[in-house]
Image: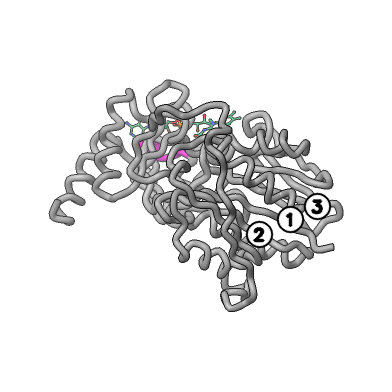
């Protein structure tokens, strides 16, 4: 019998995030080599044909999609029944969701409805092992736990950037002329909902989410107070990037958890990561070490962050950041 892995992805503003496509690439690669077919279930207000084609090109062998106006607000109940129905029809051995807050709201309900095991925070999947195994972080990232896939079904959540990406060129599957099934899934009955979302409040007012930003300006305890993050906001705005923070900044209540980069925060992979007043503790490095270029600003020349930086500036961020921002503004004619 063909073994199936089902990936559940939310489409927002008509985009399947690049990172999630990479997750599909990775799963297809590992799946193909271990006898798994990879199906993707997309849901959102509107799913442009381009999104489905992209995933087909990424190697998915089946794509199901559900588009509905009611999905503009997050309500896990809306999406639960269509996924449960799909699981009933397709009998996957593994259902993989991303670690977004929306998906983490759905995953436990899904596991409960399907009476199966839930594994959260998965960072490695070995489908080729018998039985397939997972590695995941537990106790706020203090320990790594390895567990086996529990048949007949396991629901798992994985962080974007956590599952190693396989180079697309190695896959040799970039042809969507392969016969793949792309099917529309029927909707749901909103009258059956037990609760309704009346308002959604965004706490982290980023132009771009951290996982999507090409440039991240991050601040740590080298800043003295919450208001000083205006220096980083300004630089990020000039660069069209997002602002990240280290954990102590979140612990102080200066910025929300959604902005935290690191082992117990978000793993990021921007083209440029600018670390300001961040010492470079391993728990922070784990979250940003995949950045293409790292620039560190720190007044301590011995700070560990410099070991991971491509460019290092030894100095006071309160002096350097305003100069850096104003030079960029003049260069960009802003
Ligand atoms: C289980 C566990 C999970 C964790 N998860 C995370 C995580 O996900 N993310 C995370 O970030 N941390 C995490 N941590 C915390 C981590 O160990 C460090 O404590 C934290 O990353 C340190 O943050 P920091 O670099 O901002 O602060 P500090 O280590 O206090 O460093 C501040 C830096 O700022 C520099 N500085 C000070 N003033 C200035 C100035 N004016 N100009 C320039 N530089 C200046 C200092 O030289 C210093 O290097 C975790 C810890 C544990 C135990």
Q: Is residue 330 visible?
A: yes
Q: Secondary structure at mark 3?
A: loop
Residue plotted at (38% across, 35% down): 219
Q: Residues within 10 Å of mark 3 (few under 14, many from 20)?
A: some
Residue plotted at (84% across, 46% down): 151
Q: Secondary structure at mark 1?
A: helix
Relative to 320, residue 173 above or below: below
Residue plotted at (75% across, 67% down): 33
Q: Which residues are magenta?
A: 298-303
Relative to 299, residue 238 above or below: below
Are dots 1 and 2 in contact, CB under 8 Å? yes
Are dots 3 and 1 in contact, CB under 8 Å? no
Are dots 3 and 2 in contact, CB under 8 Å? no
Name the residue beneath numbered marker 1. Answer: 90
Of callouts 3 and 1, the N-terminal one: 1
Residue plotted at (21% across, 39% down): 322
Name the residue beneath numbered marker 2. Answer: 39
Q: Nearer the viewer, residue 303 or 154?
A: 154
x%, y% of residue 152? 83, 47
Q: Residues within 10 Å of mark 2 (few under 14, many from 20)?
A: many
Left or right: 125 as drawn, with respect to 200: right
x%, y% of residue 197? 46, 29
Left or right: 259 as drawn, with respect to 175: left
Name the residue beneath numbered marker 3. Answer: 132
């Amino acid at each position: 019998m063909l073994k199936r892995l089902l990936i559940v992805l939310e489409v927002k503003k008509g985009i399947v995030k690049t990172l999630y496509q990479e997750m599909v690439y990775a799963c297809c690669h590992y799946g193909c080599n271990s006898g798994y077919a990879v199906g993707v279930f997309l849901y959102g207000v509107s799913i442009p044909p381009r999104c489905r084609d992209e995933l087909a090109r990424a190697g998915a062998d089946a794509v199901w999609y559900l588009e509905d106006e009611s999905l503009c607000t997050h309500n896990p109940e809306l999406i639960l029944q269509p996924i449960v129905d799909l699981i009933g029809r397709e009998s996957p051995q593994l259902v993989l969701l991303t670690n977004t807050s929306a998906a983490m709201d759905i995953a436990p309900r899904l596991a409960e409805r399907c009476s199966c095991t839930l594994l959260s925070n998965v960072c490695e999947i070995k489908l080729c092992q018998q039985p397939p195994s997972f590695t995941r972080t537990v106790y706020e990232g203090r320990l790594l736990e390895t567990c086996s896939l529990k048949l007949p079904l396991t629901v798992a959540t994985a962080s974007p950037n956590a599952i190693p990406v396989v180079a697309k060129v190695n896959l040799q599957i970039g042809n969507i002329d392969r016969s793949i099934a792309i099917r529309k899934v029927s909707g749901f009955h909103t009258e059956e909902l037990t609760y309704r979302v009346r308002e959604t409040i965004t706490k982290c007012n980023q132009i771009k989410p951290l996982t999507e930003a090409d440039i991240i300006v991050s601040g740590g305890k080298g800043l003295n107070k919450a208001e000083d993050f205006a220096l980083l906001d300004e630089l990020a705005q000039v660069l069209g990037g997002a602002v990240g923070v280290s954990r102590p900044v979140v612990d102080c209540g200066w910025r929300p958890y959604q902005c935290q980069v690191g082992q117990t925060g978000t793993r990021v992979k921007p083209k440029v990561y600018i670390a300001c007043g961040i010492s470079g503790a391993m728990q922070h490095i784990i979250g940003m070490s995949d950045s293409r270029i790292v620039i560190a600003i720190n007044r301590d020349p011995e700070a560990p962050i410099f070991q991971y930086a491509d460019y290092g500036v030894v100095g006071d961020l309160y002096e350097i950041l305003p100069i850096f921002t104003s030079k960029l503004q003049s260069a960009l004619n802003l």
